[in-house]
Amino acid sequence: MDVSSKFSEESLRKIAEEKINYRISVKIHVTAFLLVNALLFFINILTLPDKLWVIYPFFGWLIGLNIHTMTYILYARGVYPMAKRAFIVNLPAYHSTMLLLIIINILTLSSYIWAFYPAITWGFALVAHLIIFLLYFQQSKIKEVERKSKKERAIEKELQKMKIRLEKQKK
């Protein structure tokens, strides 16, 4: 079945407009990231060339940029359910944050590797999230085949009402 037959032209246009707005917001975020961090780099070189403090805001902001970009990509590709999106968004957040913490650890206390602890605990949380998602997702797939969700039934009911109103207006 063709996707366009499931949606009206107006609703497809609204979805397309939303995707474009998200894409533009990501481009603005990337542009601001590059300009501000270039400015911070020049300020760092001019003021304290022997200490590279600019890496802290750079990697901190990179975490937010990764999350924003990944959220857009998942939305644009139509990744559902939300639990799956949440897990996928957590992966780049985890990697970006761990990279920042490892850099801070190396630059501050290279003799004591404290960044290992948040990496392990958040790693366990990610694995637990994945296991729970997979178990839940398998159950929801089985239930989805058996019956429609409450939301889907409500949507169908509302569509029927709308069709009846349209028929009455035509008469």
Image (cartoon, rainbow, N blue to C red):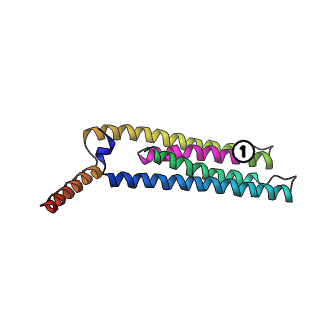
Disc 1 crowd, CA 10 A, few/some/many (<14, 14-19, 20+): some
Looking at the picture, which amino acid does disc 1 mark?
Answer: Ile
Element type at mark 1: helix
In the rendered structure, which segment of residues is drawn in magenta?
Answer: 80-102
The quadrant holding residue 138 is top left
Is 155 left or right of 95, judged from the image as shown? left
Q: Nearer the viewer, residue 116 or 26?
A: 26
Is 10 left or right of 62, judged from the image as shown? left
Q: Write the residue at 15% across / 60% down.
A: 170
Task: Report x, y in % for residue 136.
Answer: 39, 41
Task: Report x, y in % for residue 3.
Answer: 33, 42
Q: Main secondary structure of the magenta part?
A: helix
Task: Report x, y in % for residue 127.
Answer: 53, 39
Quarter of the picture containing the N terminus is top left
Is 74 left or right of 139, judged from the image as shown? right
The quadrant holding residue 24 is bottom right
Residue that numbered label 1 is attached to: 102
